[in-house]
Image (tube, rainbow, N blue to C red):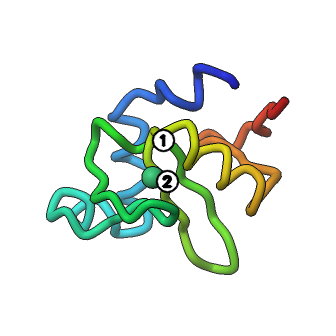
Amino acid sequence: MKESVLAIPYDEISDFLEQFDLLSSLERGEIKCLLCGKTLNQDNIGAIYPYNNEIIFACDNLFCLQLVVTKFAPLRNVKGEKYDYE
Ligand SMILES: [Zn+2]
């Protein structure tokens, strides 16, 4: 699994989230991991993935990341680069 997916600088995440008006939701603890339901914050966001006009979030737990990839592949990171899953 590519480390870059797990280590996106928080400024890039916050810029991205701001575009979707989601930054304040994250800061208020309103965004949860789709898979395990854990409340996300700037330290434990593992994946952000647009799907069906929604944005899907997953925590940095490898199990959750793997499930996101399986369910919503091809996963891209916030820079839009194709996720290289193997
Ligand atoms: Zn999770």
Tag count: 2
Q: Residues within 10 Å of mark 2 (few under 14, many from 20)?
A: many
Residue at x 40%, y 44% (from the top left corner):
45
Q: Which residue is mark 1?
A: 46
Q: Is residue 32 above or below residue 63?
A: below
Q: Quadrant of residue 70?
A: bottom right
Q: Nearer the viewer, residue 22 or 5?
A: 5
What amino acid does circle 1 point to?
A: Gly
Image marks 2 and 1: residues in contact by CB distance under 8 Å: yes
Q: Nearer the viewer, residue 50 or 30?
A: 30
Q: Quadrant of the N terminus?
A: top right
Position above or below: 28 against 79: below
Mark toward the start of the polypeptide (2 vs 1) = 1
Res. 58 mark: 2
Queried on whether the Cβ of the residue with tag 1 lies below 8 angstroms from ligand 1, the answer reads: yes
Above or below, 24 relative to 70: below
Instruction: Look at label 2 and name its amino acid.
Output: Ala
Residue ID at (79%, 39%): 82
Q: Which mark is residue 25?
A: none
For disc 2, does the CB lie below 8 Å from ligand 1? yes
